[in-house]
């Protein structure tokens, strides 16, 4: 809006106030439209906010890593349960084969099932039990990042069951050591499941901690970066009124100048 062409201090003062109100009105509208403070509003706060955002995002990804590791352990436990079931059935067959009333044909039939189960254990351990293409029961051990900072890792592993498969490879259902070999195999699987279960519990606690940390840091970041919508709305209304008043006053000041010019003329 043009200011009068003569030296009019009232007009200049009105224009300065109008310009200030208009600028503040624009800033308020920008804050309300984005919902966040800009670097111009709070440079230091924005810097802190961005670091917090990076931490929150890193924590979120670490939590995803933890969840994937838990899933891998759960998958491994599912396969170990299957191995347990097979070993239990093999133990039953071994005891059944030691029934003195069994005929040779009966023992042969029992041995056929026993052999099939024995081979199934070997197949599961050697490669069928996988997670995302990686063997789980044949030396699974990975380092997983479980935090947003360097060095925050946990080794996720499952005890290998290759010794179990090897001990069964030539076992006969009516062999003299069959029962003791199977008992030993069951113990190895039980130990592996206990170890994986303890690790899963640890990871579950880690996941809960990461979730709490992420929630807290996002809340803290929000307090620094987010605009107080109620307060900013009130400020916008105030500046809008001042801008309108300034426009009116500036028009009146210019009008007074023009009246003086007419009288002089």
Image (tube, rainbow, N blue to C red):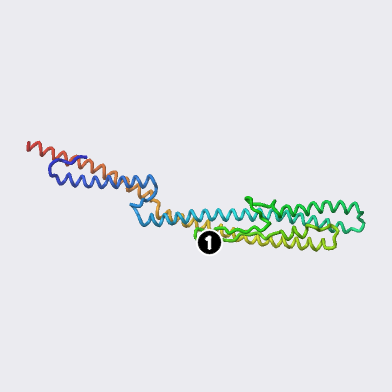
Q: Nearer the viewer, residue 35 or 79?
A: 79
Location of residue 159 by image quarter: bottom right
Q: Nearer the viewer, residue 29 or 187?
A: 187
Q: Nearer the viewer, residue 154 or 6?
A: 154
Counting other residues with Cα less than 10 Å from the Cα at mark 1, is it few (<14), some (14-19), or many (20 or more)?
A: few
Q: Nearer the viewer, residue 37 or 80?
A: 80
The residue drawn where x is 84% and y is 57% is 173
The residue drawn where x is 71% and y is 61% is 190
Q: How many marks?
A: 1
Where residue 223 appears, as percent x and y from the top left, is 41, 55
Where residue 181 appears, as percent x and y from the top left, is 79, 62
Left or right: residue 41 compared with residue 185: left
Left or right: residue 203 compared with residue 218: right
In the structure shown, which secondary structural element does the residue marked by tag 1 occupy?
Answer: loop
Where residue 55 appears, as percent x and y from the top left, is 47, 56
Above/below status of 31 relative to 186:
above
Left or right: residue 222 compared with residue 67: left
Location of residue 30 by image quarter: top left
Above/below status of 14 relative to 77:
above
The residue drawn where x is 36% and y is 47% is 31
Where residue 49 appears, as percent x and y from the top left, is 41, 55
Above/below status of 183 relative to 254:
below
Q: Which residue is mark 1?
A: 152
**Quadrant into which the C terminus falls:** top left
**Quadrant into which the N terminus falls:** top left
Location of residue 252 by image quarter: top left
The residue drawn where x is 39% and y is 46% is 34
């Amino acid at each position: 809006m043009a200011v009068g062409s003569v030296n009019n201090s009232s007009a200049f003062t009105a224009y300065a106030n109008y310009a200030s109100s208009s600028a503040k009105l624009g800033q308020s509208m920008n804050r309300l439209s984005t919902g966040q403070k800009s670097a111009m509003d709070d440079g230091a706060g924005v810097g802190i906010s961005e670091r917090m955002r990076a931490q929150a995002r890193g924590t979120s990804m670490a939590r995803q890593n933890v969840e994937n590791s838990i899933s891998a352990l759960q998958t491994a436990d599912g396969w170990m349960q299957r191995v347990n079931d097979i070993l239990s059935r093999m133990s039953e067959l071994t005891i059944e084969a030691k029934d003195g009333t069994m005929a040779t044909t009966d023992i042969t039939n029992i041995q056929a099932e026993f052999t099939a189960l024995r081979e199934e254990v070997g197949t599961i351990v050697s490669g069928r039990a996988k997670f995302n293409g990686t063997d789980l029961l044949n030396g699974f051990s990975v380092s997983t990042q479980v935090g947003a900072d360097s060095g925050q890792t946990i080794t996720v592993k499952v005890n290998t069951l290759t010794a179990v498969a090897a001990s069964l490879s030539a076992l006969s259902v009516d062999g003299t050591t069959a029962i003791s070999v199977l008992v030993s195999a069951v113990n190895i699987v039980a130990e592996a499941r206990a170890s994986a279960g303890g690790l899963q519990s640890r990871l579950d606690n880690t996941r809960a901690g990461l979730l709490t940390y992420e929630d807290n840091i996002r809340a803290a970041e929000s307090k620094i970066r987010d605009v107080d919508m109620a307060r900013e709305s009130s400020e916008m209304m105030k500046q809008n009124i001042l801008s309108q008043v300034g426009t009116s006053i500036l028009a009146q000041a210019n009008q007074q100048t023009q009246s003086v010019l007419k009288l002089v003329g």
